[in-house]
């Protein structure tokens, strides 16, 4: 254990048996069970909202989640002399959801639906609201065109630049179609409803934040962790994010999508407006935009081979998505 980690853990009432590094944090085996130590950049007013959410969910009987442990001084954040801030969370003894196992995807999707039914609660502490998706898409569209203008002016174009220009027209057509359809959809109604009724989302519902644990009957249950990005938004945004991550790892195979959507809708039915929202979100070339944005804001004198591969993957996946959208949503993507 490093000295800094030890100094932080000394601020809590527990005995540490062992520690090990995991994704961006330190997992601690203690006399009180498993805990996770992680550095945070949360603002002071964000912590009360997060603690309020945890307390509300536990009061409602929802216990498949982590929660923040208080230090010896009764605080939720432990700040060190160098200014670094840490939280310690009670953790779940389990492994990350295996995204290629359909039974675990079903459990994770069902758990999300159960969570969403509870995440309709007026908060005393402000938890934040999502930016308007139309504005997000318009910014993405402008950035894609900005990247194209930049690349066109590059005198000696490398593999990435050539691949980007070759794919741009097709990818931008997808982006424009999604943006236009969003503007003509009932998204505004969905968005206003979530604010009026206090609907919230996890904000980062992916397999890294879903732990498959064993309950008292030795059955697998999905424990949801890392609620730091929770906020008010259209709830199927969580479902979109989880579905997209699942599909990207499984080659856009329809049976995986059916498993995720059926498990969710069996507990929390998906309205036609929400299905349209999912379709629009999946239409947008998110990965292509992201790779382009990373390129534009990076050191272009040296371009990693991985960035070229990511760009090629993004283009390939959009081709797979065309067939996927037609099969799962029962209508072709017009003009694409």
Image: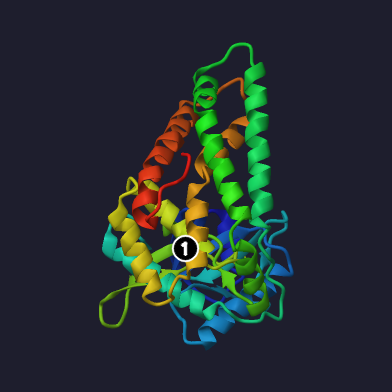
- Determine which residue is flagged by label 1: 275
Left or right of 77 on screen, residue 1? left
- Residue 132 found in image quarter: bottom right
Horizontal and vertical percent for residue 52?
63, 79
Horizontal and vertical percent for residue 288?
52, 37
Judging depth in this view, the residue of 50 and 272 nearest the camera is 272
At horizontal 59% and vertical 42% (from top left) the residue drawn is 176
Judging depth in this view, the residue of 287 and 261 nearest the camera is 261
At horizontal 54% and vertical 24% (from top left) the residue drawn is 165
- Tell me, yes or no, if residue 220 can be seen here: yes
Horizontal and vertical percent for residue 219?
27, 76
Q: In what element is the residue under mark 1?
A: helix
- Tell me, yes or no, if residue 30 can be seen here: no
At horizontal 58% and vertical 82% (from top left) the residue drawn is 55
Extreme residue in the top direction: 156
Judging depth in this view, the residue of 67 and 330 nearest the camera is 330
Q: Residues within 10 Å of mark 1 (few under 14, many from 20)?
A: some
At horizontal 62% and vertical 22% (from top left) the residue drawn is 151
Q: Is residue 163 above or below residue 220?
A: above
Q: Is residue 140 above or below residue 89?
A: above
Q: Is residue 195 above or below residue 307?
A: below
Judging depth in this view, the residue of 124 and 325 nearest the camera is 325
Horizontal and vertical percent for residue 108?
38, 67
């Amino acid at each position: 254990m490093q000295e800094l980690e030890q100094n932080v853990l000394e601020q809590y009432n527990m005995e540490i048996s062992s520690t090990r590094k995991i994704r961006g944090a330190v997992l601690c085996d203690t006399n009180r069970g498993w805990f996770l130590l992680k550095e945070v950049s949360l603002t002071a007013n964000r912590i009360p909202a997060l603690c309020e959410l945890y307390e509300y969910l536990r009061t409602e009987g929802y216990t498949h989640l982590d929660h923040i442990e208080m230090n010896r001084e009764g605080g939720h954040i432990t700040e060190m002399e160098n200014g670094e801030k840490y939280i310690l969370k009670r953790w779940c003894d389990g492994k990350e959801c295996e995204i290629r196992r359909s039974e675990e995807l079903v459990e994770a999707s069902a758990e999300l639906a159960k969570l969403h039914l509870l995440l309709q609660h007026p908060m005393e502490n402000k938890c934040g609201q999502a930016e308007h998706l139309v504005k997000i898409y318009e910014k993405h569209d402008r950035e894609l065109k900005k990247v194209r203008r930049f690349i066109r002016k590059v005198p000696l174009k490398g593999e990435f630049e050539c691949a980007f220009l070759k794919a741009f027209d097709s990818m931008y057509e997808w982006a424009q179609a999604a943006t236009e359809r969003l503007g003509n959809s009932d998204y505004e109604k969905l968005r206003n409803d979530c604010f009026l009724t206090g609907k919230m989302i996890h904000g980062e519902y992916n397999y890294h934040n879903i732990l498959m644990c064993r309950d008292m009957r030795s059955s697998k249950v999905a424990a949801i962790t890392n609620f730091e990005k929770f906020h008010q938004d259209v709830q199927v945004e969580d479902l979109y994010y989880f579905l997209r991550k699942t599909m990207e790892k499984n080659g856009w195979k329809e049976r995986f999508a059916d498993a995720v959507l059926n498990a969710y809708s069996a507990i929390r039915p998906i309205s036609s407006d929400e299905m349209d929202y999912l379709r629009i979100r999946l239409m947008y070339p998110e990965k292509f935009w992201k790779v382009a944005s990373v390129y534009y804001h990076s050191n272009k004198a040296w371009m990693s081979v991985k960035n070229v591969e990511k760009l090629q993957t993004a283009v390939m996946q959009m081709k797979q998505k065309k067939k996927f959208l037609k099969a799962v949503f029962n209508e072709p993507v017009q003009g694409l």
